[in-house]
Image (spheres, rainbow, N blue to C red):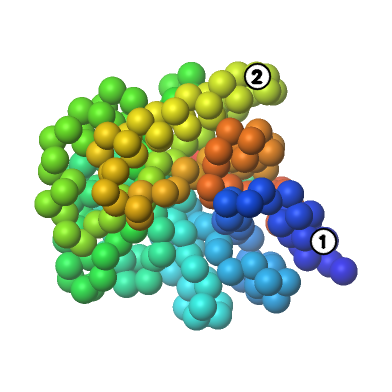
Amino acid sequence: MSSITLNLKNVTADLKEGTRLVAISKYHPAESIQEAYDAGQRIFGESHVQELMAKQQTLPADIEWHFIGHLQTNKVKYIAPFISLIHAVDTPKLLRELNKQGEKNERVLHCLLELHIATEETKYGFSPEELTAYLETDEWTTLKYVSIDGLMCMATNTEDEEQIRSEFRRAKSIYDDVRARFFATQPSFCELSMGMSHDYPIAMEEGSTLIRVGSKIFGERVYDAQDNS
Ligand SMILES: *Cc1c(COP(=O)(O)O)cnc(C)c1O
């Protein structure tokens, strides 16, 4: 058995009921994705638009592609025709663009709002206060071609498991509050995307429904993907 197939089996065996695996294939070649596909994996995540488009054109049509990186508004048009879920929507402006491109393509674009809970000074994501303030505006309810299906977050990049756990716990609590307050009549709001190679077991214990695992399946990437270009 190849290492990708074996790694995939190991991660899949760890999945808790109610959690799905997004195999993060950024910077890995199409052949590696095909291998994971042949082993049964169907959901793949990419963080660069051009790389995603090239892979989408050559790989099996029934792959469910997720976009997990920072998405620039001027690139939404390229992925709108086929993308299944956009994980890290971080501005009202991006939501409006999703709506526009969804309408053009006559399909509802599904997305998650990125919640910024890590202590790190990352540039992206809604703070808990910004998230509530935005949802209170009701603007999002007028976006007919956008479905907000949940929240996404990243924990601080630290070895401190208690810190990671408390951040995931906080995200789950915010997710529950937001769901009760703004999405009580929308069962499609049901996803909490959290957990990566080094912290997905903790994320699942704290209520993740989508884990985003890359290096533990495909091996180390040559470049790091945090550049978000
Ligand atoms: C790259 C990336 C992942 C996967 O990271 P691994 O540590 O390789 O599992 C998950 N989420 C996001 C947002 C990423 O950019």
Mark 2 vs ligand 1: CB below 8 Å:
no
Is residue 165 rendered to the left or right of residue 130?
right
Q: Quadrant of ligand 1?
A: top right
Q: Name the kind of residue labelled 1 in the image.
A: Leu
Q: Residues within 10 Å of mark 1 (few under 14, many from 20)?
A: some
Q: Nearer the viewer, residue 226 or 3?
A: 3
Whether residue 72 is visible to the viewer of this picture, yes or no, is no
* Residue occupying image coordinates x 24% and y 57%: 146
Residue bearing mark 2: 162
Determine whether 140 is above or below 101 in the image: above
| Alpha carbon distance from label 1 to label 2 | 29 Å
Q: Nearer the viewer, residue 164 or 169?
A: 169
Q: Secondary structure at mark 1?
A: helix
Q: Earlier in the sequence, mark 1 or mark 2?
A: 1
Image location of residue 11, percent across then percent down: 73, 52
Q: Name the kind of residue labelled 2 in the image.
A: Glu
Per the rendering, the mark at residue 6 is: 1
Q: Secondary structure at mark 2?
A: helix
* Residue occupying image coordinates x 36% and y 49%: 189
